[in-house]
Image (cartoon, rainbow, N blue to C red):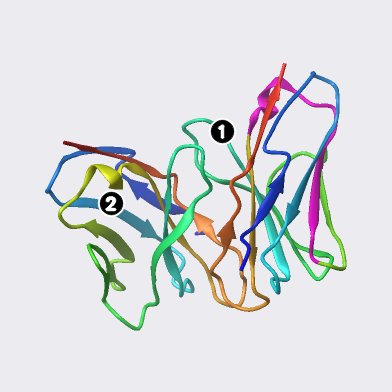
Amino acid sequence: KAGVTQTPRYLIKTRGQQVTLSCSPISGHRSVSWYQQTPGQGLQFLFEYFSETQRNKGNFPGRFSGRQFSNSRSEMNVSTLELGDSALYLCASSPSHGNTIYFGEGSWLTVV
Amino acid sequence: QQQVKQSPQSLIVQKGGISIINCAYENTAFDYFPWYQQFPGKGPALLIAIRPDVSEKKEGRFTISFNKSAKQFSLHIMDSQPGDSATYFCAASVDSNYQLIWGAGTKLIIKP
């Protein structure tokens, strides 16, 4: 079974631009969650989607948004990028029930 | 109430020694306690998990000890190896909520 796939793996953006990151969950998984991880920092929860509905949301500004499609694939968008948005963005998927989540390898975003 | 406090922040252990990482929580409704392992440049991966109906769970060299009355759980790595050098995250959740609450992480270094 293929794991969680995130694209792109690496990207560099300029301050003020916007970025869209993509996540394909494990086949059959209906929940997708997103995390931000900065160097030396823990996992900061962004949001979680289940069946195209945002089920939980972390404490991030409105510049961070996401969505989930009917095939469970998810995207997150960050608008008006700031230098502090430079981070590893991790996507994780899980089955419809149960708490075990499976992470992708992440998308490294650098804002210059 | 929703926090999970993880310690230590970093840990250096000699090869062959025992690595111990501790987590404490306040929310008595938590009923699922996983540990995740993250290598540099990779997403976290589930290592081992426990539910409060047992006090200990062992998988190979990795053991979770759970103390319900003290609201603490810990990860023990026996015969620690250089390949165990990674960042370890504890987490907790309420089964019906699906959202994991994460500890801040412990960077473990095993010296050869």
Left or right: where does residue A109 sit relative to residue B64? right
In the foreground, B72 or B33: B33
Secondary element type, mark 2 = strand
Chain identity of mark 2: B
Q: Which residues are magenta?
A: A72-87
For mark 2, what is the residue? B21
Q: Residue furthest top?
A: A112
At which x and y percent is residue B24?
Answer: 35, 57
Secondary element type, mark 1 = loop
Using the rendered view, name the quadrant where residue B59 is placed. Answer: bottom left
Using the rendered view, name the quadrant where residue A64 is placed. Answer: top right
Left or right: where does residue B38 sit relative to residue B84? right
Q: Is residue A74 magenta?
A: yes
Q: Residue at x 66, y 27 (%)?
A: A86
At which x and y percent is residue A17?
Answer: 86, 24
Q: Is residue B23 magenta?
A: no
Q: Three-letter amino acid code at disc 2?
A: Ile
Q: Residue at x 85, y 21 (%)?
A: A16
At which x and y percent is residue A67?
Answer: 84, 55
For mark 1, what is the residue? A38
On screen, residue A49 above or below A46:
below
Q: Residue at x 41, y 45 (%)?
A: B105
Q: Three-letter amino acid code at disc 1?
A: Thr
**Image quarter hosting the N terminus of chain A:** bottom right
Chain identity of mark 1: A
Circle 2 crowding by C-alpha within 10 Å: few under 14, some 14–19, many from 20: many
In the foreground, B68 or A21: A21
